[in-house]
Image: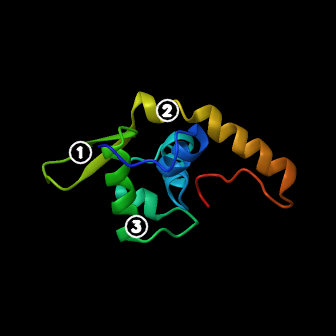
Amino acid sequence: MTQSRRSPCPIACTLDLIGDRWTLLVIRDMMFFGKQRFEEFLESPEGISTNILANRLKYLEEMGLVEKQPYSNHSRRMNYQLTEQGTSLRPVLKVIIAWGLKHIPETRIPNDNE
C-alpha cells in the first residue's frame, strides 16, 4: 500500500505510520503482553473501541507490521502477530518507556492485568 507523504523526513513518515493515539498501544500489547486475539486487546486499560481496534489491526496488517492467522474453524477468529518489521519497533518502545518513566510523574510499567 502506497501512501502519500507529507515530506521525506523519516520522523514525519514514521509518525504517519505509527503516530496516532492507538497504534503503538496495540503493538505494545502484542510485544510486551503477548496479546493476539481481538478480545484480548479490548481488555487493555486504555479502553479502545471495537471499531478503532478493527481499523488499527487492518491498517497494521496492510502496512506489514502485523499478520493474522485463523485460530479456529470459524473464519473470523484471528490471531494477530507482529511481523519482523513490527518486532523491530521494540527498541523504539523501550526508549519511549524509559523517557516516560524519567520525565512524566507517576508513570510506571503496567502489568498485563491492568
- Indicate the amino acid at tag 1: Tyr
Taking depth in this image into account, of 6 and 1 the one nearest to the observer is 6
List the residue tagged with mark 3: 52
| Residue 60 as seen in the image, left or right of residue 107 | left
Residue 68 at x, y = what percent?
Answer: 28, 43
List the residue tagged with mark 2: 87
First in sequence: mark 1 vs mark 3: 3
Local SS, label 2: helix
Residue 22 at x, y = what percent?
Answer: 51, 59
Quarter the N terminus occupies: top left
| Residue 50 as seen in the image, left or right of residue 112 | left
Taking depth in this image into account, of 45 and 48 the one nearest to the observer is 48
Quarter the C terminus occupies: bottom right
List the residue tagged with mark 1: 71
Local SS, label 3: helix
| Observer able to see residue 72 | yes
Q: CA distance from mark 2 to mark 3?
A: 22 Å
